[in-house]
């Protein structure tokens, strides 16, 4: 199947990769790509730095859903606030809600319980695609999560099952079970891995692909190698410093892509290093590259 068509069928796409590889740019570019193909897409961000609004030239989300372009929206979410929202939804009585939220027990539980914040984030995505979103975006066709860096990617996706195994009753246990089943449904949820063709990012991507197989019994929908130096022309004189740098960095890229090939024979897109400042122009250029690369991957 065409990779783009596959991505169009998914309700949740989890984009993960080592910090600094351009994960947020790829998240925004994938969102723009699907939106231009008629999908209504929400980009979810949990990083406190809020990068997506800068890439799409919108006001900061601050927790609200912000429209970036036709069919494309973004929202920054705070996991702790999602848990508090669950308390408000379940208890309803304002006096009880205030007491629980002010309770040290509640605060210690929500801060320390393994997997609870991650579960809350995926729970928000599930509620949105099932039509329980706010009036600004009642039901997106797809949610794309700009997930934490590679080292936490698999742990995030495994978290709801961990919570479901530990908390077997009550609203949290019930919610975790539903979310775990959602994440396990390959017809609805997919993972995209972003890397650069450098030693450490490729090593982490190799480990991530292996962990996805071993722990979650799933494969990425695609691996995106970002910011590649262009192929080096051997006919170009390489005695000046700039050309030598180009030759050396491209050689590193080629060697690291070969290491990636050792563990991943599936769809891969290669995005060149682009001389464009972060912003809508960069997102648009990467989106067009992904459209070409993933169609033929």
Image (spheres, grey):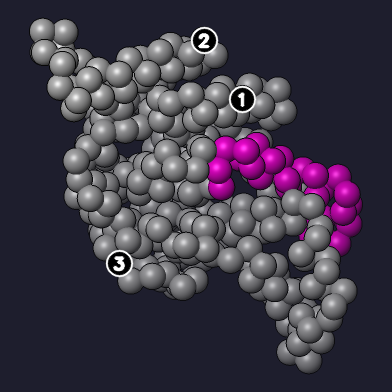
Q: Upstream in the sequence, badge 1 or badge 3?
A: 3
Q: Give the spatial CA distance, label 3 vs label 2.
A: 40 Å
x, y (%) of residue 14?
A: 52, 42
**Image position of 48 with respect to 284: above or below:** below
Instruction: Identify which residue is drawn at 25% across, 58% down.
Output: 70
Residue hosting label 3: 58
Q: 7 or 260: which is nearer to us? A: 260
Residue 152 lies in quadrant: top right
Residue 168 part of the magenta-drawn span: yes
Horizontal and vertical percent position of residue 150: 57, 38
Q: Earlier in the sequence, mark 3 or mark 2?
A: 3
- Label 1 belongs to which residue? 207
Q: Is residue 205 left or right of residue 119?
A: left
Magenta segment range?
148-176
Residue 117 as seen in the image, left or right of residue 283: right
| Quadrant where the image shows the C terminus | top left
Asked whether the beta carbons under mark 3 and mark 2 sit within 8 Å of each other, the answer is no
Disc 2 packing (10 Å; few <14; some 14–19; many ≥20): few
Where residue 2 sits, quadrant-wise, is: top left
Alpha-carbon distance for marks 1 and 3? 35 Å
* Image-quadrant location for residue 106: bottom right
**Image point (26%, 30%), residue name:** 272
Which element carries disc 3, helix, strand or loop? loop
Residue position marked by numbered label 2 in the rendering: 262
* Residue for point 40% across, 25% down: 197
- Between 183 and 235, the one nearer to me in the picture: 235
């Amino acid at each position: 199947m065409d990779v783009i068509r596959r991505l169009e069928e998914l309700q949740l796409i989890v984009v993960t990769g080592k910090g600094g590889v351009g994960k947020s740019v790829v998240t925004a570019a994938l969102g723009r790509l699907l939106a231009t193909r008629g999908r209504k897409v929400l980009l979810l961000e949990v990083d406190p730095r809020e990068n997506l609004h800068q890439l799409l030239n919108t006001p900061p989300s601050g927790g609200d859903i912000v429209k970036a372009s036709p069919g494309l929206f973004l929202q920054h979410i705070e996991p702790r606030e999602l848990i508090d929202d669950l308390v408000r939804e379940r208890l309803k009585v304002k006096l009880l809600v205030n007491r629980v939220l002010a309770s040290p027990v509640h605060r210690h539980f929500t801060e320390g319980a393994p997997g609870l914040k991650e579960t809350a984030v995926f729970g928000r995505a599930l509620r949105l695609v099932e039509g329980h979103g706010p009036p600004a975006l009642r039901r997106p066709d797809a949610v794309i999560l700009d997930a934490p860096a590679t080292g936490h990617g698999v742990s995030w996706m495994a978290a709801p099952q961990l919570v479901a195994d530990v908390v077997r009753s009550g609203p949290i246990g019930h919610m975790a079970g539903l979310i775990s089943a959602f994440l396990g449904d390959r017809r609805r949820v997919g993972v995209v891995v972003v890397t650069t063709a450098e030693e450490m990012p490729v090593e982490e991507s190799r480990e991530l692909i292996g962990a996805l197989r071993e722990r979650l019994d799933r494969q990425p929908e695609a691996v995106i190698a970002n910011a590649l130096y262009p192929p080096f022309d051997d006919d170009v004189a390489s005695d000046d410093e700039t050309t030598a740098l180009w030759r050396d960095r491209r050689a590193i890229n080629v060697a690291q892509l070969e290491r990636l090939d050792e563990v991943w024979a599936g769809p891969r897109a290669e995005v060149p290093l682009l001389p464009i400042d972060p912003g809508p122009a960069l997102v648009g250029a990467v989106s067009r590259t992904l459209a070409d690369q993933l169609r033929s991957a």
